[in-house]
């Protein structure tokens, strides 16, 4: 194996650090750099640790750390010395951690005897032990120099660059070390390094390298094994997650997924996927990889490819939900611009253990006040306007939830699509009515339910009917339905910031299992604007009759622009959407592909706004 030199390595370092190159290209260049410097990192670690296996581990960890910090490298020619400092750090970490019992350097001899003469074999082993003992007795600076010199015929100049010392110092240390060792010992050292140096085969490089490829159907088995291995205590949850992934409707919603595999063995090291939600500009992200591979470049390879797909799809946001215990993944996402937006508890009710008799009087009291609990199926049979009423109720209750502020109402067509989904149970969508008025709602769905179970979806009660037992009565109806239909469990994701719902679920017998954190990243740049500018935008805007007809607006339709704190909102009918600034006059909407431009007249005052979506464009005059 030919030794490294900076002249050959410099182009690789430039490619690996090029800001305009793709991550995959940078990762490939870094893999070639690894080939150049692997023996040097190993030799340095071997000299410090006195154990070839620990030295290989330390060198691999050093390259992983170097990849993560590569953007910190200011000058390509400084890479060898920079890598050396990282190797030293990894060696010190191993010795400080005391993860293993360290033996003297001479005990590291592990050469299989191939000589047919037993006495000759014994003599050879004794000589090898003496070699390692003699090397172990050298001062560390001499030991490092002689290891580097013989591990792969590195020149004294290359060793000097790596150790950050003059060539004359390298020559002096090498001369002194050689004088302390006999020639036969040096020959044995060279043989030992030949057997252990990383460049003897490709396995070292493969351990810190990965390749990305599109997902294929045959990968599901490997993805299942990866999920089970990452979270062995959550197998039922993993099965539910895998079932949901395999049932994803790619005919209606976009999905892209990839695997990162071991370059040599083809073992799958990581899996990444983005899935479009019912709010079509918003996507969900999943990343599976153990902590080592996540930080070794697998996480970045997957994430960058998925972010490219999201940009091509014109996505606005992407979000991921992970266990609270997955601190490595959460930190990885936070370092890459994701922000925590929610934290929920996974609560579960074992139906065979649920005792509900104490709550029956609550339901009787609710009924005595004239409140009836029916189902979506029954309502649709008797009231053709049912979905419109339910849509208005859901937006009203969600807007009254402080955890959802600022709230952006759900479009009516999204509600219609939701109730058409295969995992929604229309006869398990329970509506509390007082007369003809919808005052409460709770449902059970199959999405993200455990095998043989159901999941509690949304539950909400109008403000004036709260603390009167309505939510309890709705939950009781759902529990009874689940029992009658043979379900074993009910799962409920409950926000940590909703103590009232946590208390109700606990009272009904739900037990806390896991915590989840939701992280979100904006894919469009949100400009920083002086919110005082928004004062001139506040008001009411009405489209001309021809524009109203073009968009299908009712007569008298108007958009109201409001300012809340330092944020701007557009309110139209029952919908309220936050406007995110791209500039002082250009704004986009997060929940759907909508864009607003505020236009000034000759006096510098806002005269009208222009609204665009993928199919329409129109303007509305400011009337107030």
Image (tube, rainbow, N blue to C red):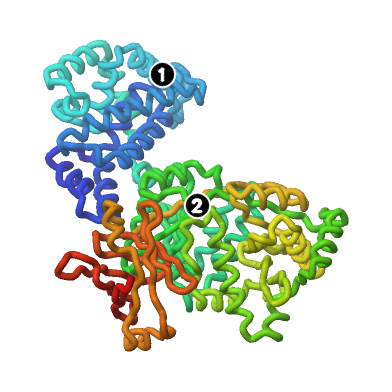
In the image, residue 12 lies at what x, y percent?
19, 46
In the rendered image, which quarter contains the N terminus?
top left
Image mark for residue 105: 1
In the image, residue 516 lies at what x, y percent?
56, 49
> Helix or strand or loop: what does disc 1 sit on?
helix
> Left or right: where does residue 84 sit relative to residue 341?
left
Q: Residue at x 49, y 56 (%)?
A: 405
In this view, the mark in front (2 or 1) = 2
In this rendering, the answer to whether 115 lies above or below 290 is above
User: Can see residue 309?
Assistant: no
Q: Are marks 2 and 1 in contact (CB under 8 Å)?
A: no
In this rendering, the answer to whether 488 lies above or below 94 is below
Foreground residue among 326 and 509: 509
Dot 2 or dot 1, earlier in sequence: 1
User: Can see residue 239?
Assistant: yes
Q: Residue at x 55, y 67 (%)?
A: 395
- Crowd around label 1: few <14 · some 14–19 · many ≥20 (10 Å): many
Q: Residue at x 49, y 67 (%)?
A: 409
- Crowd around label 2: few <14 · some 14–19 · many ≥20 (10 Å): some
Q: Which residue is mark 2?
A: 518
As measured in the structure, the alpha-carbon distance from the residue carrying label 2 to the one carrying label 1 is 49 Å
> Helix or strand or loop: what does disc 2 sit on?
strand
Foreground residue among 601 and 100: 601
In this rendering, the answer to whether 416 lies above or below 64 is below
In the image, residue 77 lies at what x, y percent?
15, 35
Q: Residue at x 64, y 63 (%)?
A: 462
């Amino acid at each position: 194996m030919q030794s490294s030199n900076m002249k050959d390595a410099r182009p690789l370092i430039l490619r690996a650090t090029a800001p305009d190159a793709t991550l995959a290209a940078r990762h490939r260049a870094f893999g070639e750099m690894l080939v150049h410097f692997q023996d040097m990192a190993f030799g340095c670690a071997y000299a410090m640790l006195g154990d070839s296996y620990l030295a290989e581990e330390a060198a691999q960890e050093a390259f992983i750390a170097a990849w993560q910090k590569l953007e910190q490298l200011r000058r390509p020619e400084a890479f060898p010395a920079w890598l050396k400092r990282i190797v030293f750090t990894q060696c010190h970490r191993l010795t400080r951690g005391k993860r293993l019992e360290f033996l003297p350097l001479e005990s590291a001899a592990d050469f299989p005897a191939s000589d047919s003469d037993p006495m000759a074999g014994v003599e050879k082993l004794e000589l090898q032990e003496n070699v390692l003992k003699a090397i172990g007795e050298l001062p560390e600076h001499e030991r490092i120099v002689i290891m580097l010199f013989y591990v792969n015929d590195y020149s004294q100049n290359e060793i000097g660059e790596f150790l950050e010392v003059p060539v004359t110092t390298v020559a002096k240390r090498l001369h002194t070390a050689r004088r302390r060792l006999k020639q036969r010992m040096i020959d044995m050292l060279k043989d030992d390094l030949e057997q252990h140096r990383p460049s003897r085969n490709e396995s070292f490089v493969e351990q810190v390298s990965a390749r990305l490829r599109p997902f294929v159907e045959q990968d599901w088995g490997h993805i299942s094994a990866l999920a089970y291995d990452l979270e062995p205590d959550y197998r039922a949850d993993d099965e539910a997650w895998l079932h949901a992934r395999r049932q994803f409707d790619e005919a209606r919603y976009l999905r892209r997924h990839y695997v990162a595999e071991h370059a040599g063995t083809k073992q799958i090291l990581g899996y990444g996927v983005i899935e479009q939600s019912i709010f079509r500009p918003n996507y969900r992200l999943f990343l599976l990889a153990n902590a080592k591979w996540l930080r070794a470049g697998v996480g970045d390879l997957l994430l960058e490819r998925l972010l490219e797909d999201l940009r091509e799809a014109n996505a606005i946001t992407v979000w991921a939900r992970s266990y609270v215990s997955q601190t490595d993944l959460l930190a990885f996402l936070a370092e890459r611009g994701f922000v925590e937006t929610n934290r929920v508890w996974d609560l579960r009710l074992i139906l065979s253990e649920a005792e509900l008799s104490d709550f029956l009087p609550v339901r009787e009291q609710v009924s005595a006040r004239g409140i009836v609990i029916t189902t979506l199926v029954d309502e649709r049979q008797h009231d053709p306007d049912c979905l419109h009423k339910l849509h208005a109720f859901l937006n009203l209750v969600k807007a009254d939830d402080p955890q959802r502020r600022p709230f952006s109402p759900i479009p009516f067509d999204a509600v219609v699509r939701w109730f058409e989904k295969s995992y929604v149970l229309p006869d398990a969508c329970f509506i509390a009515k007082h007369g003809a008025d919808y005052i409460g709602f709770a449902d059970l769905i199959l999405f993200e339910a455990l095998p043989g179970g159901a999941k509690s979806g949304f539950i909400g009660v109008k403000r004036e009917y709260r603390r009167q037992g309505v939510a309890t009565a709705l939950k009781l109806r759902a529990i009874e339905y689940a029992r009658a239909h043979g379900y074993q469990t009910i799962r409920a994701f409950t926000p940590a910031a909703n103590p009232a719902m946590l208390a109700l679920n606990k009272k009904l017998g739900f037990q806390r299992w896991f915590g989840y954190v939701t992280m979100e990243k904006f894919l469009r740049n949100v400009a920083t604007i002086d919110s005082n500018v928004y004062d001139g935008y506040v008001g009411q805007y009405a489209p001309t009759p021809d524009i109203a007809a073009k968009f299908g607006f009712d007569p008298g339709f108007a958009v109201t622009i409001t300012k809340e704190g330092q944020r701007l909102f557009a309110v139209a009918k029952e919908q309220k959407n936050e406007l995110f600034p791209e500039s002082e006059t250009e704004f986009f909407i997060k929940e759907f592909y909508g864009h607003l431009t505020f236009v000034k007249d000759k006096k510098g005052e806002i005269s009208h706004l222009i609204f665009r979506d993928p199919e329409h464009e129109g303007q509305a005059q400011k009337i107030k």
